[in-house]
Image (tube, rainbow, N blue to C red):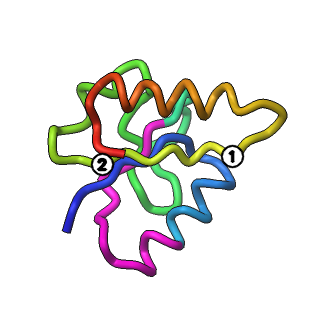
Amino acid sequence: MNNIVLLGAGGHCKSCIEIIETLEEFKIKGIVDINKTEENFMGYKILGTDQNLKDLLSENDFGLVCVGQIKSPNIRIKLFDLLKNESIKI
């Protein structure tokens, strides 16, 4: 089973967690959130912030942007590009 790290700890992340748990194809390694104010989210460890993303993922981990689109897709695009630029499997 492959590890996956989720980016964003909000409402959309809850939906993503429910789907990932149902499919049983990935093991959720943890969550990265820009405001690391909590230690856990829905039972999964908050690993850190997107500033230290590269240090939090190994070369075999997958990443998933779990930020919903509010008014603009800019945050989602930024996080996707961050994963892509760090050569993390998406």
Residue with the most extreme left position: 59
Q: Position of residue 78 (x, y in %)?
A: 55, 24
Q: Nearer the viewer, residue 35 or 88?
A: 88
Q: Position of residue 16 (x, y in %)?
A: 54, 62
Q: Which residue is mark 2?
A: 62
Tag 1: Cα neighbours inside 10 Å, few (<14), some, or many (≥20)?
some
Which numbered disc flags the more N-terminal residue, 2 or 1?
2
- The 10 Å Cα crowd at callout 2, few under 14, some 14 to 19, many 20 or more, is many
- Residue 84 lies, in percent from the top left, at 37, 30
Left or right of 9, for residue 57: left
Q: Residue at x 58, y 54 (%)?
A: 13
User: Is the N terminus in the top left, top right, bottom left or bottom right quadrant?
Assistant: bottom left
Question: In terms of secondary structure, where does tag 1 sit?
Answer: loop
Instruction: Return the residue at label 1.
Output: 68
Q: Are the two marked residues, 2 and 1, in contact with CB atoms closer than 8 angstroms? A: no
Q: Quadrant of residue 26?
A: bottom left
Q: Is residue 54 above or below residue 39?
A: above
